[in-house]
Each structure stands twice: as structure tokens, then as C-alpha cells.
Image (tube, helix red, strand yellow):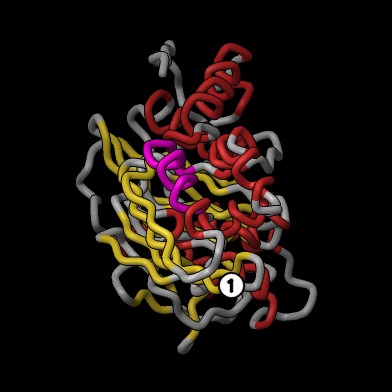
Amino acid sequence: MLPLQRDTGIMLHHKAVDNQENHNPHLNLALEEFALHYLVQEEPLLLFYINDRSVILGRNQNVLEEVDLGYLAAHGIPVVRRLSGGGAVYHDSGNLNFSMMMPGQGRLHDFAYFTSVVVKALNEFGLQPELRNRSSLFFGSRKISGNAQYATRGRLIHHGTLLFDTDLEAMLRALNPGHVEIESRAVQSVRSSVVNLRELLAAGTTLADVREAIARHWEGGILTTDDALSPADWDAVRQLADERYRSWEWTFGRSPRFAMTRQGLLNANPVGVTLTVDRGQITALEFAGAGPDMDLLQQLAQILIGLRFDPPVLRAAIVEAQDLSMEAGINPETILSLVC
């Protein structure tokens, strides 16, 4: 990725970076990273954004261990990997995201300091949330916010999500890869009971009301887009979005080594699949079963080993071997469904 360059001799005079009402998760994460590296000088900054439907993955997580890729593909929901650690989260238009950035690393791991801003804001509406499990805000026994941090080059970012009116059914389905058994060292999300703030707040309270309350309690410098982000800056943000956050290598290729087992059917015959993926590449693939198509599957396994674990790549390889599948009267999509 090309290094970003920016004139950092700017003065900060507004409370928040303006993301121009952009809802693209790739661009918002790129803007967040750009602001962290190039806009933070002597004062803290605050960035709000609302993403379209997406799953945001922690830096060290395995995609397959955290999400149902079939559900996401069927509903056009992208997966995007962020810089910070922590668990996978589901974003949509009912989820408010906040990023608090500051120079230095003195507040690293001090989740209480940053989440206290949100707590004070919600106190205005009569709610008394509590920080638990180090990085999450709860109202009673139910979770309303997850948080994570990332530090680099003498700067720190604390960012979190706040459930306001999120589609909880879609969230639970997107973050449920239970149809496969997976073993890996990847960080697993801790899933808790959750609740939307809309259920807790007085009727008529809007997401914008909550956002404004958080801004009132944030003690930071103020930064407007006009003052801080030039057209060239936005070009750099878009470049970063393309080269990092939209790239397969960043989102999928960084997944830790994992082994996966699953069961399927081929021409009504049970087939077991054992798959090992390391750095996004298939390093081992075995099919087990007693049907008449096992010789075909073993030949396909040898073709797929060494390829990256990416459905379009695997589909292309299976289609290239179409003579094998046509010989047995098997649709390539059926074979692909056995693998991913």
C-alpha cells in the first residue's frame, strides 16, 4: 500500500471529524485510520459514523469462525477487518459508531475513561449503564456497546458501537457460523444478550439526540471537514479504502490458521469435508464418504489445494475442471457448497 502523505500543520477547532454522512464501511474505516495518523496533533478528536449493513471483524479474528458467509453473501453484507482487536460486530443504520482519538498512549487499556463519555451521555436520558468485561457497556444484564482500542506512532484510538435500533435478528444470524465445526487459535467473540437503546429510552428520543449528548461530554478539540480534509485528503482516504479495507488479503488473508470439518450431500450421498487453511490458502483438503463420486472429489481436492480460500477463486477452478464434474453430472455450485 502506498504511504499516505499529509501536511500536518493544522489547527483543530471543532469537536468532531465530519464524515460527510458517508455510510460505506470500507470508507469509514479508512477515514478513521487516516484521521488517527494525520489529523491528531495536540488535542483529542471525535468521529461519528453510521455504516450500511456490514460485519466488522477484529484484527486477529478468523472470518469463518465469526460469521456465516452464506448468509452474508445472500444478503449482500460485506465483511471488513479493522485495525483494533476485539470481537466481530454487526453494523447497520441503527448502530452508532464513535471513534475517540488522542495523541500519546497514556490512556491505552483505560476503557473506563472513554466509555465514561457514553455513560454520562446516557445518564442524561435516565439510563445508568455499567462497564463490564473490561470493554463493554451493559444495561442490566444486556449489552448495549462493545469497544476496542488500537495504538500506533504515539497515537491512540478508542472506538465502539452503540446499539440504538439495530436489526438484532440479522445481527445474530450474521454472527453465527454454527453450521460448521472449527478449531483455531483465533480470538472468538464473546456473545452476550443485547438490547437496543430504543427499547430503553423515552419515546421520541432519536439516534441524533444520543450522538449530540456524547459530543457534549467529549473533552476534545473541534475539527471540521472544511478545515481539515482537502480533496486530496479524501483521495487518500479512498485509496486506503481500496488498498486495505476492500482487499481480500487484508480481510480474509489475515485469518489465523484453522481447520474446518463439515458434512454435506453429493447426489444424495453423505460427504465429509476436512479443510485446513493457512494465511488464506488451502493447505489440506480431504473428502470422505462411500458414494460413487469419491474419485472425482479426490481429484478436485488436489486441484483446489494451494488456492486461496475465496469462493470466486474456487468457483473458477471448479468450472475449469468442469469435465470432471460434468462426467458425474454434478453442478459446480454443489461442489463449491461442500467446501465453503
Q: Where residue 119 sits: x, y (%)?
A: 46, 70
| Residue at image location 49% in from the left, 24% down from the top | 243
In the image, residue 37 above or below residue 16: above
Q: Could one spot residue 235 in this view of the protein?
A: yes
Magenta span: predominant SS is helix
Quadrant of the image occupied by residue 33: top left
Region in magenta:
297-309
Q: Could one spot residue 50 in this view of the protein?
A: no
Quadrant of the image occupied by residue 21: top right
Q: Nearer the viewer, residue 164 or 317?
A: 317
Q: Residues within 10 Å of mark 1 (few under 14, many from 20)?
A: few
Q: Nearer the viewer, residue 11 or 173?
A: 173
Q: Secondary structure at mark 1?
A: strand
Direction from residue 338 to residue 323 in the image, left or right: right
In the image, residue 222 above or below residue 144: above
- Quadrant of image for the N terminus: top left
Q: Nearer the viewer, residue 321 or 293?
A: 293
Q: Residue beneath label 1, please?
A: 269
Q: Where residue 152 sits: x, y (%)?
A: 27, 35
| Residue at image location 53% in from the left, 67% down from the top | 175
Q: Where residue 132 sits: x, y (%)?
A: 34, 77
Circle 1: residue type: Asn
Q: Where residue 191 sits: x, y (%)?
A: 44, 75
